[in-house]
Amino acid sequence: MELLQIRTLVLLLVFGTTLTQCKPKSDSDEETLLLLAVAASKICVNNSYTGTTVVNSTATLDTNTDCITGMTSSMSSDLPAWIRNNFKCSVGTVSGSNYVFRSQNIPNNKSFYFGSTSPMYVALAGGQKSAGNNQIASQCLVYTIPSAPAAKSGTLVGTQSGYASVGITVNGLAIFNNAAAAPDTLATEAQTFDTFNGHPQSSGVYHHHSQPLNVTNNDSKLIGVLLDGFPVYGLNCDNATTNTGDDGAPGTVGPALDAYHGHTANTVLFPSGIYHYHFAYDSTATINTLIGSSFRGTPGTVSN
Ligand SMILES: [Zn+2]
Ligand SMILES: [Zn+2]
């Protein structure tokens, strides 16, 4: 183990509680993540596969890949076109009946949370608040996501069950659930989102609960895939045409959304229809979020 990693773990062990308390509005699952980081000395399943650790002070955007320099970005040729042609800033492969994504999880947008010495730093905008001392840090997230998702029968699996992430965006970033630490709602925590609607939790995992603004901005674009294999889209449904003039809110285009932010409708990428989630109002969060309190399908696994 690198000396730096040991020091980080020791710091987490000693100051874990304090760090969490420093953060004004933490996610309900972030304490779990912190404990996982402390308990597991090897938190990276396949480090070499995801490339080098990205350091904030030297992080720059690679204009060829549109990912941070040093990030690995490749999609294997046996992945379906909807993934191959839309996902980047992670390594995507097929493994049996699953898709596997490995991501260093560094945003390809500027953020306050890179820290002021980073070329990727940008100040917060008016009305935004800092999430304590949290800063973006390179991760080793590995997602194993079913390639043939199906609606689950019986009791659904909650999205607040200690997952390191509940899905991955098209630009390789973690998706977090609709919760914040009680008694706050995510609406309060949203004050700490940066100018692209993301923020890091206490161990540096940058994530989106809300629409990633350099992927979608109140439109019908594909945002990513959730852990159960169903895709997640922006605010609007694309009406199965590339013309954006006929896009509209779910319910106007396609059936109304269910309690899990989803419906089955035809989309450009899935002309014969698929269940998919939308960035939509969430009664728990009291703001729009990327996922509700339960997965509609059976979630795969994620490690970090
Ligand atoms: Zn969060
Ligand atoms: Zn839709």
Image (cartoon, rainbow, N blue to C red):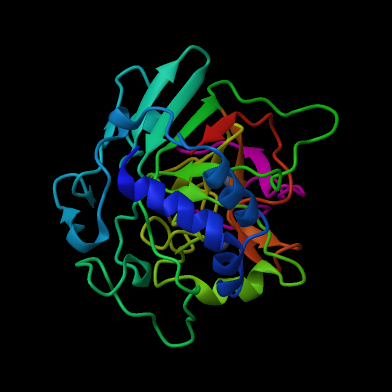
Q: Quadrant of residue 51?
A: top left
Residue at image point 73% right, 50% down: 293
In the rendered structure, the answer to whether residue 53 lies left or right of residue 96 reads left
Residue at image point 63% right, 58% down: 280
Magenta stretch bounds: 245-270
Task: Give the quarter of the figure containing the N terminus.
Answer: top left
Q: Position of residue 154 (x, y in %)?
A: 85, 29
Q: Position of residue 40 (x, y in %)?
A: 53, 37
On screen, residue 41 above or below 45: below
Residue 63 lies within the magenta run: no
Who is closer to the viewer here, 118 or 290? Answer: 118
In the rendered structure, the answer to whether residue 266 lies left or right of residue 58 reads right
Who is closer to the viewer here, 270 or 222? Answer: 222
On screen, residue 200 above or below 51: below
Residue farthest right in this picture: 154
Q: Is residue 229 visible?
A: no
Residue farthest bottom in this picture: 126
In the rendered structure, the answer to whether residue 69 lies left or right of residue 99 reads left
Q: Quadrant of residue 150?
A: top right
Residue 254 lies within the magenta run: yes
Q: Is residue 59 visible?
A: yes
Q: Assign ligand 1 to one image quadrant.
A: bottom right
Residue at image point 54% right, 46% down: 38
Q: Position of residue 63 (x, y in %)?
A: 14, 52
Q: Quadrant of residue 31?
A: bottom right
Residue at image point 42% right, 18% down: 94
Residue farthest top in this picture: 96
